[in-house]
Amino acid sequence: MRKVVTALVLLAAVVAGWAVSERHYIQRYLTFQGDPMVVPLEWFDPVDRVAGRQDDDLPVASVGALTIDSQALEAAAGFAEEQNSQAFIVVHRGVVQLERYWQGADRDTRFNPQSMSKTVLGLLMGAALAEGYVQGVDDPVGNYVHEWADDPRGAISIRQALGMAGGLEQMATSYENSFFSRGTRYNFGDDFNGMILELGLVDPPGTRFEYNNEETNLLGMVIERATGRRYASYLAEKIWQPLKLADADMYLDRAGGSVMKSCCIFSRPYDWAKLGQLVLDRGRYEGRQVIPAGWIDAMITPSVLVQHYGYQIWLGDGYVQPGPAAPAGSDRAVAPEGYLTDDMIVFLGFGGQRVWISPRHELVIVRGTARWPVSWVETRIPNLIIKGLADRETPA
C-alpha cells in the first residue's frame, strides 16, 4: 500500500508540475469560445501596444459634394449591413464618402482584422529594407534567423516567403480546436517563434504557392532579428505613428514575449482606411514618403507562380471562385462576376475583413466585422461602388 501511495503522490506531483508549466495554454484553451471569428478581443491576453499618434484627418464629403452616387453608397451599405458588418467606410480621392457602423460600434470600436495584418507586415518589411536592416528580398532567411543559418530551411528567401512560396510546413490545416492539436497549441501557447522553428520543408522553396500563416510569422521574426526591435514597437515607429493612427494592440504569446505577426492587430476600421490610402498613394502621407514607392510597386506585382498574389497582398479576382454566394458561416471568395476593374488590390482577412483598393478609381473601401457573413458575395460591395462613381474619367 505504501508503494501505491508513493506512486500516486509522485504522479500527482508530475501532473501538478505539468499543469503549472502549461497553465497559460490550459487557461486559454478552457476559456476560448470555439470560433476565432467571434472571440471577444478581451480574450487575447497579454497584448503588446502599438502606440499611435491619433489624428482622424481624412476629409469628409458633404452630401452635396459626394463623388459617388448616393444610391450606390446606400446599396453597398445595405449589403454590408445584411452581412453582419460592424463597420463600412468608403473613401474616394482621399475623401470619405460614407462611414457607417452597426451593432453598437462607432469609430473608436476596435475589431480583429485577422489576416489583413499580413499586408501590414509586407509594408513593414519595406521599411526594414529602406533602413538597411534587411539587405534585400533575395536574402535567405537564415541570414537573420540564426537557428537556420546552416539548415536547408534557412535557404528560403525573403522574396519567396513574401509571396507564400517558401515551401514551409503548415502548422495546421484546419481551425479544429483540439487540446492535442499542434495548431491549437501554437495559437494558445506561449512560444510563437519557437514553434515556427520546429516546422520542416514540404516543398523546395520557390516551387509552389501555398497560403501559409507561418511564412508570414517567419518574416516577422526576420524583421525582429534584423532590427533588434520588438515587432509592435517597430510597427508603431515606422507606420502607426507616421500615419497618425490610434493606439492598437497585438496578441502576445506571454508577457514580454513575441506577438503573433500573421494576424490580430486590434485596431479601428478607420485606421485601415488610412492604411489602404497609403497603398493607393504609393507609400506617401502628408508629403512624406512613409514607405518607399518602389516597395509598394513591388508588393502589388504578381508573383511568378500566381497572378493573384504579390507580397502579402491579394491582387485582382483570380482567387474569386464562380458561384452565387458563400453559405452562412463562411467567407469564401465566391461571386457570380469578377471585379469591375482589373486593378483591384485587396487586404483580406478571415471572416470577411476587407480593404479593397482600386488605384484607377482612386478608391478605398473598408469592411470590418465581429460576426460571420450570412451569404457572402466577394465582389458585390466594390462593384456597387464602382458602378456609382459619379466621375468616371478614363486614366490617361
Image: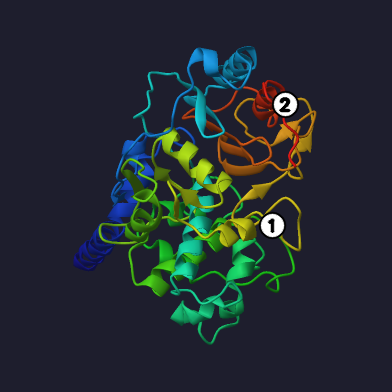
- Using the image as rendered, state which of residue 239 and residue 179 is in the foreground: 239
Q: Is residue 382 above or below residue 140?
A: above
Q: What residue type is labelled 1?
A: Thr
Q: In this view, does 201 lie above or below 317?
A: below
Q: Is residue 146 left or right of residue 31?
A: right
* Residue underneath mark 1: 301
Image quarter hosting the C terminus: top right
Kindly identify the residue that appears in the image at 69 percent across and 36 percent down. 333
Which numbered disc flags the more N-terminal residue, 2 or 1?
1
Q: Rounded to the nearest whole Å, what is the CA distance between mark 2 and mark 1?
A: 28 Å
* Residue underneath mark 2: 325
The image shows residue 293 at horizontal and vertical percentages of 56, 58
Q: Is residue 130 above or below residue 301?
A: below
The image shows residue 239 at horizontal and vertical percentages of 40, 53
Q: Which amino acid does label 2 sit on?
A: Ala
The mark total stands at 2
